[in-house]
Amino acid sequence: MRLLVLGGTWFVGHAIVTAALDAGWEVTTFHRGTSAGTDLKGVRTVQGDRTKPADVAALTGTGPWDAVVDTSGYVPRNTLHVARALAPVADRYVFVSTVSVYRDWPRKPLSEDSAVLPCPPDAGPNHGTDTEDGPTRYGYQKSGCEAAAVAAFGPDRTTILRPGVVLGPREYVGRLPWWLRRVAAGGQVLAPGSPDRPIQPVDVRDLAAFTLRTVADGISDALNVCAPVGAATFGELLAACADVTGAAASFEWVPDDVLLGQGVRQWSELPLWRAYEGVWRVDATRARQAGLLYRPLSETVAGTWRWLTEAGETRIHDRAVEIGLSRDKEQRVLTVWEASGKRTG
């Protein structure tokens, strides 16, 4: 298989490139070469900017490919231009999207039949608005990118992958790395809500393997890519963090209403915590029927800790600056919770 990956040096793209090389595929990456990410040995690199027509035109001359995997499309108008340019030299277009394209995420449970946010395939970067509990401009934009991919390649040559939360080695947003580092520091750890809260993140390596599966099998569909609903709990996540770090940590589970009352920001200050019904109720049955396999969450936690401690990884993405609760604020919330007299431990 000849594969072109748009991006390919950071988190999801890097995992897809790694999986493709391990499978013996010929891999080309296209990126600007300005990020902290690096290409793997054995990859053919084409440097260029996807927003520059001349660079995209030069890229098409290095084909053809059996498939394109787009991990770096964020603006519909640009995705439409890139996809149209590649349509004559690639058999299939796989667009890595997000569950944020759904109108009701994260407030309600959803499946692939749920309504998506309206966005035309030629929309510019300012289409859509941000609201506190969703939807977001990011979701609108990704929805438009999906439409752009289909407009350029047609529904029979397009695959749309909608991951939920993706965790694993090289996770530059820093959600799981923050929890690992906080638990490793030990002591009393503020834990959000209930240890029994179901969560369903997908390991980046499982997402990558499934991406290649859709290419090899010629799957033309829009698919949610998550672990099954209820596959793991928040308590199991933090227990796995304590296990791999060997930390002497204890967890104080503080109810959602107390956290919200103390102004703790959902999704960012306490990563992966959100008090909406639909966050962790994404139906991914279709993807599992198409071959998605998922590993235990404990393996994802262990792999991420190994990467953090052994790889000497120091990169920090712009999105990582908002992740994490300060120790001072954590202690203030714990003090308020203890003073309430409602603790059961």
Image: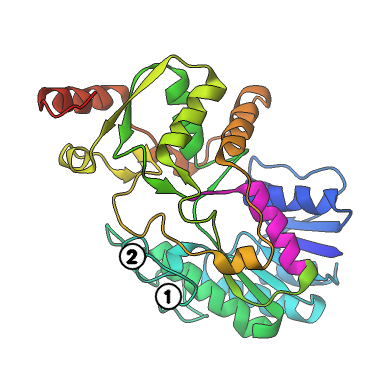
Give the distance between the C-alpha atoms of the residues marked 1 and 2, in whole angstroms: 10 Å
Q: Which mark is residue 108?
A: 2
Identify residue for label 1. 114
Q: Badge 1: few (under 14), some or many (20 or more) residues near its Cα, within 10 Å?
A: some
Magenta span of residues: 200-215
Under mark 2, the amino acid is Lys
- Identify the residue at horizontal 85%, vertical 64% (top origin): 2
Q: Of marks 1 and 2, which one's residue comes earlier in the chain?
A: 2
**Residue 172 in picture, x, y percent from top left:** 55, 40
Q: Nearer the viewer, residue 9 or 48?
A: 9
Nearer to me, 190 or 134? 190
The outermost residue toward the left is 340
Q: Residue flagged by tag 1: what amino acid is it?
A: Ser
- Where 309 falls versus 140 (above or below)? above
In this rendering, the count of numbered labels is: 2
Q: Position of residue 279 (x, y in %)?
A: 38, 56
Image check: 337 left or right of 177? Answer: left
Q: Is residue 92 left or right of residue 61?
A: left
Q: Residues within 10 Å of mark 2 (few under 14, many from 20)?
A: some
Q: Is residue 152 above or below residue 13?
A: below
Q: Does the magenta run of residues contain 208?
A: yes
> Residue visible at 52% across and 68% down?
75
Mark 2 residue element:
loop
Q: Which percent across, then down, holds residue 281? A: 41, 59
- Secondary element at tag 1: loop
- Whether residue 156 is visible, yes or no, is yes
Of the pair 318 and 323, the residue shown nearer to us: 323
Q: Is residue 146 left or right of residue 137?
A: right
As drawn, the label of residue 217 is none
Residue 192 occupies quadrant: top left
Proximity of marks 1 and 2: CB atoms separated by less than 8 Å: yes
